[in-house]
Amino acid sequence: MADSSASFTPRTRLLRALTGEPADRVPVWLMRQAGRYLPQYQAVRRQYDFLTLCKTPLAAAEVSIQPLEAIGSEAVIIFNDILLPLEHAGARIAFDERGPLISNPIAEPKDLAGLSEREVIQDEPVAGTIREVRRRIGPDWPILGFVGAPFTLAAYWVEGRMGRELAGIRKLRKSQPDFLLKLLDRITRAAIDYLRIQIEAGADAVQIFDTWGAILNVEDWARFSAPSIRMLINVAKSHGVPAILYIGGCEPYLDEVNRLYRETRASLCLSVDWRMELAAARERLDPGITVQGNLDPKTLLEGPSVAASAVAALFEKYPPRPGYIFNLGHGVLPATPVESARAVIEAVKRFGVYCS
Ligand code: CP3
C-alpha cells in the first residue's frame, strides 16, 4: 500500500470514493469545517459581517481554504450559506448572533405577490469564490459546492426566525399545500441556477442540504421535498459531477433516496446523520449509492483522544472500503476544540486504509 498513495491526490481520492471506485484509503472532510470554532476564521470574520464575507470572493476563498491547513481536511467546501439563493427568490435575509433572520416571512400568497425575483448571474460572488479557491489550491484538491434543499429553504423563509417547532411551515403544508408547492417552485428555480453556476465555476461535487426535511412524514417528503431535490441532482448529473445528499434524520427516507437514485441514475452519495448506524444505512441503500458520515459532532467536544478513539471505533463497525467518505453526522459545533477536529482527520488517515 505504501507507494499507492502517490498515485492518488485528495481530489481523485474523493471523486473515486463518490463514484464507488477503489483507491488507497477513505477520504475525509467535515461539514461546517470553516467557522466559528477556528480562530483563523474569527480573525477574518471580525472584518466583515457574515453576509458580506459570503459575498466577498477573496475573503470567502481564504476562509474556505483555512481547514486544509488548520485541521488537515482533504476537501474545500465553499464558504457561503444555504440561504443565499433565497435572496434571488425575494427574501430579505440578515444574520445576527441568534442566526438567520428573514424580515419578510411568507405566511400566505399575498406575502409573495409583490416580491420580485432576481436572476442568478453567471458571475455571482460564489462563482468568484470558487475560481479564487481553485487558483490558490491548484488542481489536486477537490472543491465542493452546495445548495439547500428547497423545502429546507422554504422552512427558513416561512419561519422568518427559525424556532424549534417549525410551526409556520407545518401549518402551511396542511392549510395551503398548493401554495407551498408554488413557493417551492420559485425557490427551486433560484437553487438550480445557484447550483449550476457553482459547477460551471469549477466545483468538483455538490452537496444538497435537507436539514429540515425530516419534519415531513415519508409521503409528504416524497411530495414536498424529493421533487426539487431530484431536479438538483439532475443538474449535477447533466454537468457530470457527483451529488451528495444530506437529510437530517435520514432513516425513514432511505427508500425514497433509493427511488431518487433509480429515477436519476446519477452519481449519488447519501450523507448519513449521526442518529443511525452507517452499516444499517448501507444495508438498506441501493449498492450504487455511496455513503458519507457519520460521527456524532458532540463526540469532538470531549477532546482529541476521545474523538480519535471514536473514529477507530467507527471503523471497527464499518471497515474502510470504497464508496465511503468519512465525515461527521452533522456540522462541526462552534464549541469544538480545534485539536479534536485535527485528531479526527488524522485518525481517518491512519485507520481508514483499505484492507487489501
Ligand atoms: O461547511 C462549511 O464550512 C461551509 C460553509 C457553510 C455555512 N453554512 C457557513 C456558516 C455551509 C455549508 C452552511 C450550510 C448551512 N447554513 C446549513 C446546512 C447545514 C446544517 O447545518 O444543517 C444551514 C441549515 C444553514 C443556515 C445557517 N447559517 C444557520 C442556522 C446559521 C446560524 C447558526 C450557526 O450554525 O452558526 C448560519 C450561519 C453560518 N453559516 C455561520 C457559518 C460559518 C456562522 C456565522 C458567523 O460567523 O456568525
Image (tube, grey):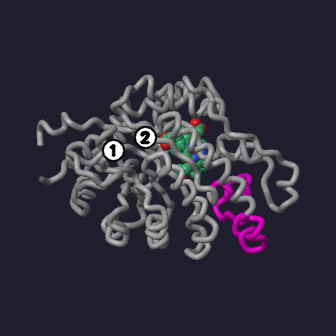
Q: Mark 2 to mark 1: distance in Å? A: 10 Å
Does residue 339 sit above or below 206 in this rendering? Answer: above
Q: In front here: 120 or 27?
A: 120
Indicate if the residue with disc 2 has its beta carbon within 8 Å of ligand 1.
Answer: no
Q: Amino acid at mark 2?
A: Asp
Task: Please state if 121 lies on the left or on the right of 297 as rendered.
Answer: right
Q: x, y (%) of residue 16?
A: 30, 47
Q: Quadrant of the N terminus?
A: top left
SS at mark 1 in the image: helix
* Magenta segment includes 224: no
- Tell me the residue at 42%/59% (across/down): 270
Ligand 1 position by quadrant: top right
Residue 14 marker: 1
Name the residue furthest front.
238
Location of residue 97 by image quarter: top right
Residue 204 marker: 2
SS at mark 2 in the image: loop
The range drawn in magenta is: 153-181
Q: x, y (%) of residue 62?
A: 49, 26
Q: In front here: 270 or 273?
A: 270
Predominant secondary structure, magenta span: helix
Q: Amino acid at mark 1?
A: Leu
- Tell me the residue at 56%/28% (across/down): 128
Task: Say whether disc 2 or disc 1 marks the residue closer to the N-terminus.
Answer: 1
* Residue 42 seen in the current view: yes
* Residue 271 seen in the current view: no
Does residue 82 sit above or below 10 in this rendering? Answer: below
Q: x, y (%) of residue 155?
A: 67, 58
Whether the residues at callouts 2 and 1 have beta carbons within 8 Å, the answer is yes
